[in-house]
Amino acid sequence: MVRVWLLVLVFIAAVLTGCETKMAQLPSLPGEHALLFQAQITKTLALKYHLFLPDDYGSDPDRLWPLLLFLHGSGERGADLERVKIHGYNKISAPRPGFPFIMVSPLCPGETRWTNHLEALDTLLSQVMANYAVDADRVYLTGLSMGGAGAWQLAIEYPRRFAALAPICGWGEPLLAGRLKDLPVWVFHGALDTVVPVTESERMVTAINEAGGQARLTIYPDATHDSWTATYANDELYEWFLSHRLGND
């Protein structure tokens, strides 16, 4: 695998300003890339993010790729972008030669939560989709713990953005879960989790299904808070993602 590390300052205004990022500013080679995204929404916000491009990216100029957005947990917050790889790249794409997803893994600024940055995440996603060969019908979302909560809320705010959602040991707002009734959802949690009780996932799944959805819940009977290692090691998850496209479910 070709691995190229670049640090790029990307200055982008909010979508409403009409400003576009130049293609030449962004890396296009397969492998790992470290970037900085700066969005001017209500105030300037910088988000570092890790970008993974598949091995064959760019070999076929007409090929569009699925995209996976990963949101890390609270323990990885701060300034060190390498930390997003602990439970992200290192558990998801690194063990899988030929991993077919473009993967975007932003870094949450210290002492904040993903729920504070939903608009910035949506704008970052728009930037990546505008500058890379992304299949807009195959954009997927996952996250763990605090990132699971962020994934729930991001999907609730932008339910037509994603083709499938997989929150892990997160929490959400059951009163808003009905917005996800048309979105394929697969939720994972450890039965022995004392950090985020499994009832948080059960409440969200129940609310979606009572609204007419078909959310799935996998509970690991012997797992505590770490229910992500088993989840991200399961190839069925990625096959499940790829089985869904916007407008086909």
Image: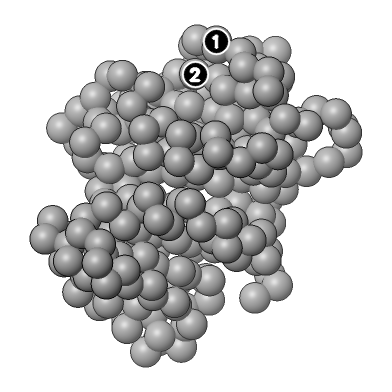
Q: Pointer 2: what residue?
A: 34
Coordinates of residue 191 in the picture (x, y in percent): 22, 70
Above or below residue 141? Residue 23 is above
Residue type indicated by callout 1: Leu
Q: Of the residues shown, which amino acid type is indicated by label 2?
A: Ala
Residue with the mark numbered 1: 6
Instruction: State left or right for residue 177 relative to residue 249.
Output: left
Work out whether residue 204 can be spotted.
no
- 31 in relation to 73, above or below: above
Element under label 2?
A: strand
Residue positioned 68% across, 18% down in the render:
2
Q: Residue at (31%, 57%) from the top-left corner?
A: 227
Where's residue 135, x and y in %? 72, 48
Report the side of 3 relative to 228 (left or right): right
Does the residue at mark 2 contact the one at mark 1 (Cβ under 8 Å)?
Answer: yes
Hey, which quadrant is residue 193 in on the image?
Answer: bottom left
Q: Which mark is residue 141?
A: none
